Amino acid sequence: MLSTLEVITTVVVGLMVGVEFSVAFVMNPIFNALPEDSNQQAHSHGGRMLGAVMPVWYIGSLVLVAVWAIAGWQHQGTGLVVTAAGLLILSVIMSILLLVPINNQGKTWTPENRPADWKEQMNRWNRYHYVRVAVIIAAFTLLVAALV
């Protein structure tokens, strides 16, 4: 049973990392190559779509990692799992305090109502997002190492 939990958790966290990596290094460069109105609209649509899904994914991943840490407390690698949980907690805190406020504004923008500094706000979101991606990659790496 623990092995199944470990695999499911690693896959769920790995997929989350893949989505966030793709946003940072695939989708945003594509959006930024679009003409200004289309760029902003693509960012807004992405914010609405992923803003609805990712909170559940982040919290669900954290819950799975916590269950793994508790269920496998006496097993080798638990320290890695606990550390991964700490990193996922950090990523949730970063999201709530830094990224979600910008996303909540950006997802309502249209070419008619966006603020003059919308590009600067998106660049700030991207900088925070890069750090968050590094944090969740580290968490995922620890989970993979704990499987060994």
Image (cartoon, helix red, strand yellow):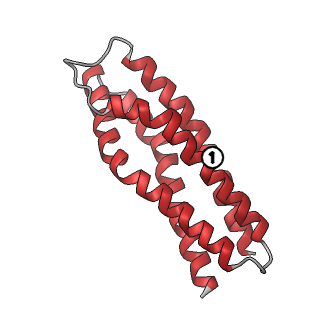
Query: Which residue position is annotated with label 1?
Result: 90
Locate residue 6 relative to residue 79 in the image: left or right.
left
Q: Is residue 143 above or below residue 46?
A: below
Q: Nearer the viewer, residue 30 or 17?
A: 17
For the C terminus, the quadrant is bottom right
Residue 122 lies in quadrant: top left
Q: Residue at x 53, y 62 (%)?
A: 61
Q: Residue at x 74, y 67 (%)?
A: 145
Mark 1: few, some, or many residues within 10 Å (few <14, many ≥20)? Answer: some
The location of residue 38, given as percent across then percent down, is 26, 27
Q: Nearer the viewer, residue 109 or 64?
A: 64
Name the outermost residue toward the bottom.
Answer: 1
Q: Is residue 43 above or below residue 3?
A: above
Name the outermost residue toward the top.
Answer: 116
Q: Nearer the viewer, residue 21 or 86?
A: 86
Q: Residue at x 78, y 80 (%)?
A: 74
Locate residue 52 relative to residue 131 in the image: left or right.
left
Q: Nearer the viewer, residue 142 or 91?
A: 91
Q: Is residue 119 above or below residue 60?
A: above
Under mark 1, the amino acid is Leu
Considering the numbered disc 1 on the image, is that residue within a helix, a strand or a loop?
helix
The location of residue 19, given as percent across then percent down, is 46, 52
Residue 142 lies in quadrant: bottom right
